[in-house]
């Protein structure tokens, strides 16, 4: 029988010990909970900006909730520049692609739904997961873009849990 260790365990067991990235021992923080009211007039292609995260955040969870009043609807969930920084799309479906948001989701994990933000990205600062060569040291908006109109009015919310990834 073979023992298989993660890099974290191997680094700590090495002689001499190898330092892990400081964010591997950091406390989880939250972006806050971005709550919006949607209606049947929330159209496809509407942008919903939920929360803001720093470019050095190491994203651990992207949790999506909706109340039962929303009977149908879907959205992509990704990263956009802030309005103050031009508001441009960085990766429209980094976390989720056409995520169904109807029928009362409760803290549904969406970080890896699209497959773009793979499980290997859970150990990388956001800027690196976005394929950048250096940290731009800016804020990004976690933004939903409606892909299927909402079947009824209701409440949507997104919460991002992360650790600081450095300076």
Image (spheres, grey):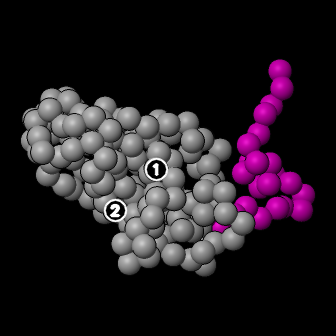
Q: Nearer the viewer, residue 128 or 97?
A: 97
In the image, is residue 11 part of the stretch drawn in magenta?
Answer: yes
Q: Which mark is residue 67?
A: none
Q: Nearer the viewer, residue 111 or 44?
A: 44
Check disc 1 and report the residue beneath it.
92
Q: Position of residue 137 (x, y in %)?
A: 56, 77
Q: Nearer the viewer, residue 49 or 66?
A: 49
Other residues around mark 2 within 10 Å, as few (<14) / some (14–19) / many (≥20): some
Check disc 2 and report the residue beneath it.
51
Other residues around mark 1 within 10 Å, as few (<14) / some (14–19) / many (≥20): some
- The boundaries of the magenta stretch are 1-25
| Quarter in which the N terminus is drawn | top right
Q: Is residue 103 left or right of residue 15?
A: left
Q: In this view of the protein, can residue 49 be seen by the observer?
A: yes
Tell me if residue 93 comes above or below residue 130 in the rendering.
above
Residue, far right = 15
Q: Position of residue 3 (x, y in %)?
A: 80, 31
Separation of disc 1 and disc 2 at Cα?
Answer: 15 Å
């Amino acid at each position: 029988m073979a023992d298989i260790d993660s890099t974290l365990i191997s680094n700590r067991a090495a002689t001499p010990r190898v330092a892990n990235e400081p964010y591997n021992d950091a406390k989880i923080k939250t972006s806050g909970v971005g709550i919006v009211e949607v209606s049947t007039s929330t159209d496809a292609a509407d942008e919903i900006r939920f929360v803001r995260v720093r470019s050095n955040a190491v994203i651990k969870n992207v949790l999506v909730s909706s109340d039962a009043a929303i009977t149908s609807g879907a959205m992509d969930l990704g990263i956009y520049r802030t309005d103050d920084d031009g508001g441009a799309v960085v990766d429209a479906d980094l976390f989720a692609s056409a995520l169904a948001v109807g029928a009362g989701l409760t803290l549904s994990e969406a970080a890896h739904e699209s497959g773009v933000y793979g499980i290997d990205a859970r150990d990388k600062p956001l800027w690196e997961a976005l394929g950048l060569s250096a940290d731009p040291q800016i804020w990004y908006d976690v933004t939903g873009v409606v892909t299927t109109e909402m079947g009824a009015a209701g409440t949507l919310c997104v919460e991002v849990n992360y650790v600081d990834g450095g300076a």
